[in-house]
Image: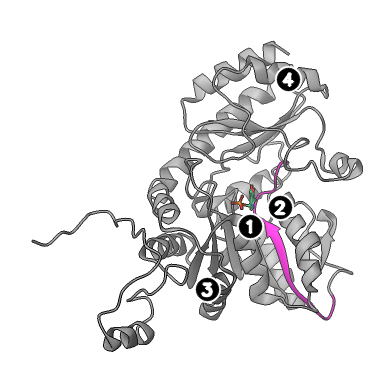
Amino acid sequence: MSISPKVTPIYQTSVFTFEDLNALEAYFQEPGQHYMYTRYGNPNSEELAQEINKLERGAGAVVTSSGMSAILTAVLVYAQAGDHVLCAEEIYGGSSSLLSNELTRLGIEVTYVPTADIFSLEGHVRENTKLLLAETISNPMMTVMDLAQLAQVCQRKGLKLVVDNTFASPILTRPLELGADLVIHSVTKYLSGHSDVTAGVVISKAEADSTRAAQIMRTWGLNLSPFESWLGARGLKTLKLRMREHSSNAQAVAEFLEQHPKVQAVFYPGLFNHPQHAMAKQQGNGLCGGMLSFRIADDAEAVNRFMHALTHIPFAPSLAGVTTSLSYPLGTSHRGLTKEQQEKMGITVGLIRLSVGIEEAEELIADLGKALEAI
Ligand SMILES: Cc1ncc(COP(=O)(O)O)c(C=O)c1O
């Protein structure tokens, strides 16, 4: 009897057996055809990596235990003690903590580039600068980065461009095609899509960078478990459908919020008044994703009343699941910034971030409308 499952089974094993010395030799001669130890490689993590690599059109991908370990891997591919890295100032708080609090202790210096200087990098590049880290769409103000322009300046300055493509997903944007060298994702978000996985991925334009990323993943022990890999691969199968639905729902919700008298401002690239609207549409393949932020009165009690009055939308400080949730940047992701930094970025008491899911848009709008009336 031969068993051939349609779906890859979960190889929930930490180690693989060998028949004899010839089988061991085959493992070393034909990498990717055989497995030895799950930290080095496992069919489930390989499947997830290969599927994401196809979507991002890379030369190779490595999955990791989290988005954070993907960022760590990406930086270590290009930088070592004595090197300097640049980072866009509008960046996920965990990325800046990793760079400022941890990698500096290993001798890697970091400078944050103000948004106004990002396309010139004037005065920020040193002889030992190796890379620039930036996000396709920033959190929580949804600033969209012109990646082709950024890649050009990086090339001129001899820097590698590392792009965190988490908020966009490869359905909207493929940074490698626009000139980036490495792409990372928190697979925890859209790629998995169901709020039940913590994972990351590094995708490379050059095969040699992928080999190096795999070495770092194995040696630092940043591997992803077989079950999380399996869940990720399963989620990925519906990514395209989900991104279309996230985007059309977010557009409808943004348009609703924009005209509501209790809403002072809406930040969504799909709105005409968004500063990068035209570029975002073009770079996003006509889609703007499911993330948006909006501002109500800068009054914590009003925010609490709004949260209490929602029936279907929970306050959950993550994003990109199939069901809608909201987050509060001032109290979660951007809590560690100084008051001046928060104000400069527009992160005020009344700023709420929505991760718009794939429910019926009318239901979401009804829930939001009811809660806005309650403030
Ligand atoms: C843009 C972005 N990059 C990276 C991360 C880190 O990912 P993880 O939580 O999977 O480690 C996050 C987490 O929220 C994120 O939003």
Residue at screen point 65% across, 41% down: 269
Q: Whole-percent x and y of residue 145? A: 69, 54
Q: Residue farthest to the left? A: 1
Residue 340 to residue 8: above or below: above
Cβ atoms at labels 2 and 1 below 8 Å apart: yes
**Which quadrant would residue 150 be assigned to in this image?**
bottom right
The residue that appears at 62% across and 68% down in the rendered structure is: 73
| 272 vs 74, nearest the viewer | 74
SS of the residue under disc 1: helix
Amino acid type at image mark 3: Ala
CA separation, marks 3 and 1?
Answer: 15 Å
Q: Earlier in the sequence, mark 3 or mark 1?
A: 1
* Discs 3, 2 touching: Cβ within 8 Å: no
User: Does the beta carbon at disc 4 come under 8 Å from ligand 1?
Assistant: no
Span of residues in magenta: 126-140
Q: Mark 2 or 1 closer to N-term?
A: 1
Q: In the rendering, at what x and y percent does residue 328 appear?
A: 71, 33
Determine which residue is flagged by label 3.
214
